[in-house]
């Protein structure tokens, strides 16, 4: 086990599966005590148990990041267990397909509530104590969709652009307190969301060839690809990085 993040307490939302699970597992390998926060309490505890079995330190907490009382209760519990949160990683997110005239208003609201409001609620739950301690790091997993248009993904694109905007404001407003914020913007990654997207686009051989051709490195990403970027940004090696967006997309945006 490495010690890149030794002695730090990290909270990772959406860590029951996918990118969140990959980040939480990588953080634990680097010595961090990790709080697995997820709307699915069973998945959260499964991830935490796997980390503990591998020799890491992890606990789970159930939270719906879009719901203010749920976030307040979850972080009250976290703060009872740990004196401080050193790193928050906002990963929890959803994808609903559709152009602006196709998507239902309730799906637009749900996407914005999870992907943007959730970042706001979780971040402001840890910021006061980070300000008191004059240190802390907040990372948010956004998407390359924040920087380019994607057909029939109006709500998702808007929500990820909002997440980047929140990140930049945290960086500016709290830099004086030694707090850093950065966004990680992945391209297509092997997760349940990618399966959902593939079904929505049409899971054909033509589509698969198109996806691979869009990635100069010849493959789509893995949760571990994103996790390694998160480890770097959370570590002291990134001590002069704030307000930035790290693109992790196999060259697609280029």
Image (cartoon, rainbow, N blue to C red):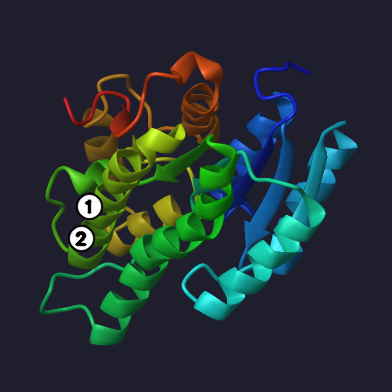
Horizontal and vertical percent position of residue 207: 25, 46
Q: Quadrant of residue 32?
A: top right
Horizontal and vertical percent position of residue 238: 45, 19
Task: State how far apart marks 1 and 2 are (Cα).
Answer: 5 Å
Q: Is residue 88 visible?
A: no
Comparing 163 with 53, the one in front is: 163
Residue beneath the point at 16% across and 63% down = 152
In this view, 72 is above or below 13: below
User: Quadrant where the C terminus lies?
Assistant: top left
Q: Is residue 99 visible?
A: yes
Horizontal and vertical percent position of residue 110: 36, 76
Residue where numbered disc 2 is placed: 158
Residue beneath the point at 20% across and 70% down = 98
In this view, 203 is above or below 250: below
Comparing 199 with 92, the one in front is: 92
Label pair 1/2, CB-CB below 8 angstroms: yes
Horizontal and vertical percent position of residue 28: 72, 32
Q: Is residue 190 left or right of residue 150?
A: right
Q: Residues within 10 Å of mark 1 (few under 14, many from 20)?
A: many
Which element carries disc 1, helix, strand or loop?
helix
Which element carries disc 2, helix, strand or loop?
helix
Q: Is residue 7 left or right of residue 175?
A: right
Q: Quadrant of residue 179?
A: top left
Residue where numbered disc 1 is placed: 161
In this view, 208 is above or below 120: above
User: Quadrant where the N terminus lies?
Assistant: top right
In this view, 188 is above or below 153: above
Q: Is residue 124 left or right of residue 185?
A: right
Comparing 193 with 28, the one in front is: 28
């Amino acid at each position: 086990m490495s010690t890149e993040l030794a002695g730090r307490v990290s909270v990772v939302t959406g860590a029951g599966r996918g990118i969140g699970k990959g980040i939480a597992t990588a953080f634990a390998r680097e010595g961090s005590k990790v709080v697995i926060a997820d709307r699915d309490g069973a998945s959260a505890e499964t991830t935490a148990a796997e980390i503990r079995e591998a020799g890491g330190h992890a606990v789970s907490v159930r939270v719906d990041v879009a719901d203010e009382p749920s976030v307040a209760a979850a972080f009250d519990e976290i703060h009872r267990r740990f004196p401080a949160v050193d790193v928050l990683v906002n990963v929890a997110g959803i994808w609903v397909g559709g152009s602006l005239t196709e998507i239902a208003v309730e799906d637009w609201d749900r996407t914005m509530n999870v992907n943007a409001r959730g970042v706001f609620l979780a971040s402001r739950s840890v910021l006061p104590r980070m300000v008191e301690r004059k240190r802390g790091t907040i990372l948010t997993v956004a998407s390359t969709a924040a920087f380019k248009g994607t057909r029939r993904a109006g709500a998702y694109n808007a929500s990820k652009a909002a997440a980047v905007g929140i990140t930049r404001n945290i960086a500016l407003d709290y830099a004086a307190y030694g707090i850093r914020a950065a966004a990680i913007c992945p391209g297509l990654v092997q997760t349940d969301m990618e399966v959902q997207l593939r079904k929505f686009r049409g899971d054909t051989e033509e589509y698969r060839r198109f996806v691979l051709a869009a990635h100069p490195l010849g493959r789509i990403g893995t949760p571990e690809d994103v996790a390694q970027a998160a480890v770097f940004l959370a570590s002291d090696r990134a001590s002069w990085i704030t307000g930035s967006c790290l693109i992790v997309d196999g060259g697609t945006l280029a």
